[in-house]
Image: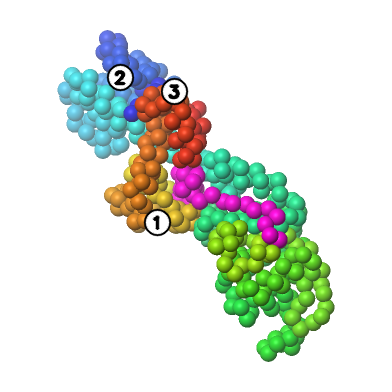
Amino acid sequence: MMEPLTPVALVDDDKDLRRATAQTLELAGFTVSAFAGAKAALAELTPDFAGAVVTDIRMPEIDGLQLFDMLKERDADLPVILVTGHGDIPMAVQAIQNGAYDFIAKPFAADRLIQSVHRASEKRRLVMENRALRRAAEDAQDSLPLIGQTPAMENLRNILRHIADTDVDVLVAGETGSGKEVVAQLLHQWSRRRKGNFVALNCGALPETVIESELFGHEAGAFTGAQKRRMGRIEHASGGTLFLDEIESMPVATQVKMLRVLEMREITPLGTNEVRPVDLRVVAAAKIDLGDPEARGDFREDLYYRLNVVTISIPPLRERRDDVPLLFTHFAARAAARFHRDVPALSQSLRRHLSSHTWPGNVRELSHFAERVVLGLEGGGEKAISLPSASTTLPEKLEQYEAEIIREALAANDGDVRRTIEALGIPRKTFYDKLQRHGINRTGYAARK
Ligand SMILES: Nc1ncnc2c1ncn2[C@@H]1O[C@H](COP(=O)(O)OP(=O)(O)OP(=O)(O)O)[C@@H](O)[C@H]1O
Ligand SMILES: [Mg+2]
């Protein structure tokens, strides 16, 4: 499928040939800018020219090969197709070795030219998309640690902004790797509490015997081995934020005490009767749905209700797929800087893998994948695309395939609904239903200016 209005720059000093070639390309759907010489073309072609360049080699003043060299200076990724006369073929071959996209020997069949320009344009389109993504990822890096442009992520950021600077306790729910800790940190950073400590405590990782003294602190001699007085994590978080990670794994006895802390905003260190006030904002994270009695198990209902003043649910990555390329680009750029490697281009097969994989490990899995790609351990080649996750059923695979086809059609039509619907051959209503079901954001495909 071809993008509408794909531009092509055509450079040829021969007026008749120029006109005929321009017409051939226009009939094939390209938008042609024709130039009578290299100078005129150089004046027009900026480094972000979105199409391919077709140039004759034999021209007065600056010839096609010199033009190619100059364009390469400006933008090494600009595809240049050389049109050669009989004697120029060895030179053209040399030019290909220097990075020219293709050469076509005169006289040529219209199809041969059109095909080459098609492929060059497609390559150019990917380059331009990669650049736009990279730019967006850089912008994202500058401004926000929570990357994503899907409505789900916009919405999430919106909620965070609204509640960050209140003291309300928050329960963050989401699958592994979906960004619960990122959200907790943002709630801290976007509040006045950022001057205080952000104290993270993994309730699942601490042995039951240690967790209470960790949380509440103890006096010297409170128990065997407690030689010195020690401040607990809760007190340490006073004035800041206490992040209780994997709250679903908190031992039941501790849950009772935690409930008291949440209600009274005070603690009693082990080995004393002294009550100390604490000024806390508690953010708890859970991988399971604590609202579901089945899933909750022996997690106390009263603690759940106490924590559940505000619940923020982070959707799994498979429900906000349109963010995958952006996140990938961000992680790849970061990994490339860290490992001193080149930033990999988003090839077709890599894109296919990104859009078909279900990402059970969510954003963390994607960031590790990006690192492996940067290190060359995963090319996004055959291996990467022929890895449908073993757990997907046929209906799931069909769903993914359908979503991918819709995304491709949107991309090919710059997000234009009428043309996309035509290309897909489905009724408008069905189209919108499908967009919603797959969580596809049409506006993300609008032509980039
Ligand atoms: N929207 C996002 N933008 C950028 N990075 C993200 C985003 N979401 C998650 N990450 C990154 O992905 C990784 C996993 O995120 P995080 O640790 O917050 O997940 P989690 O939900 O706490 O997972 P777990 O339940 O396994 O602890 C981190 O490196 C984090 O920085
Ligand atoms: Mg976590």
- The answer to if 331 sits in the magenta stretch is yes
In this picture, is 8 found above or below 253? Answer: above
In the depicted view, which residue is nearer to us: 275 or 138? Answer: 275
Q: Residue at x 22, y 19 (%)?
A: 110
The single residue placed furthest to the bottom in the displayed view is 224
Please tell me which residue lies in front, 48 or 321. Answer: 321
User: Which contiguous range is marked in magenta?
Assistant: 305-332
Q: Quadrant of residue 279?
A: bottom right
Q: Residues within 10 Å of mark 2 (few under 14, many from 20)?
A: some
Residue 294 sits above or below residue 272 on the image: above
Residue 352 visible in the shown view:
no
Q: Mark on residue 372? A: 1
Q: Residue furthest left?
A: 86
Measured in 3D between alpha carbons, the distance from the residue under mark 1 to the one under mark 3, in whole angstroms, is 39 Å
Residue 115 relative to residue 206: left or right: left
Looking at the rendered structure, the secondary structure element under dot 1 is helix
Give the Cα separation between the discs numbered 3 and 2: 21 Å
Q: Which residue is mark 3?
A: 418
Task: Kindly identify the residue that appears in the image at 35 percent across and 20 percent down.
Answer: 30
Q: Amino acid at mark 3?
A: Arg
